[in-house]
Amino acid sequence: MRAFILLLAAVLLAACGSDKPAAKLNIGDLAPTFQTIRADGAAVQFPAAWAGKPLVIRFWADWCKYCEGEMKDIETVYRRLKPRGLEVIAINAGQDRKTVVEFMQKLGVSYLTLLDENSAIAKRYGVVGLPTTYFVDAKGIVRAKLIGEADAAGFERAALEILK
């Protein structure tokens, strides 16, 4: 079983497009900086674009069977907590703009979507499976990390912690 898990991790890391091992981003670490483009084509930088704001950073892909339902649940929580300052970004790992835009339009979610076509950002964050979600406080520190599907209640609990 252990050999299978190691093989699976190696395959997922290889798919990220680099020979370097993925980072190990843990609770208490400073979230890595990155530059990319939004689904609408505008350039964006982290942390500059969200300086001083609590932020949820979610990695996903349209082929991920757990991502779609969870993204709709996130939308519900996001709309409820946005007036309190919560920001959510959904970083698509490894897909092109057309695929990302069509999927997000189908879901009807309003939070920001970013592109990571070569999975370089996902690799910097140590993502080895989708979905993976990081909850980053206003100082840029990772306060929670969810790997795999989370329900709306679990997502909201973690989001409320970074809003304190």
Image (spheres, helix red, strand yellow):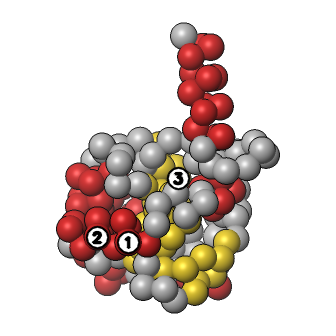
Q: Residues within 10 Å of mark 1 (few under 14, many from 20)?
A: few
Task: Check the image and name the residue furthest to the top.
Answer: 1
Q: Is residue 106 above or below residue 28?
A: below
Please identify the residue farthest to the bottom as the structure is shown.
42
Numbered badge on residue 144: 3
Residue at (24% x, 58% y) in the render:
73
Q: Residues within 10 Å of mark 2 (few under 14, many from 20)?
A: few
Contact (CB < 8 A) between labels 2 and 1?
yes
Q: Position of residue 79 (x, y in %)?
A: 25, 75
In the rendered image, is residue 161 in sight?
Answer: no
Question: What SS does tag 2 mark?
Answer: helix
In the figure, residue 122 lies in which quadrant?
Answer: bottom right
Counting residues from the N terminus, which is met first, the one under dot 2 or under dot 3?
A: 2
For label 3, the SS is strand
Does the image show residue 35?
A: yes
Task: Please give the label number shown on residue 102.
Answer: 2
Q: Position of residue 164 (x, y in %)?
A: 47, 69
- Amino acid on which disc 1 is placed: Lys
Which residue is the site of mark 1? 98
The residue drawn where x is 65% and y is 77% is: 35
Relative to 66, is 158 on the left or the right?
right
Identify the residue at image location x=57%, y=86%: 43
Q: Pick whichever of labels 1 and 3 is earlier in the sequence.
A: 1
| Amino acid at circle 3 | Ala
* Element assignment for label 1: helix
Left or right, residue 114 beside residue 18: left
* Mark 1 to mark 3 CA distance (whole Å): 31 Å
The answer to which image quadrant residue 11 occupies is top right
Q: CA distance from mark 2 to mark 1?
A: 6 Å
From this view, report whether residue 52 is shown above or below residue 160. below
Image quadrant occupied by the N terminus: top right
Q: Amino acid at mark 2?
A: Glu
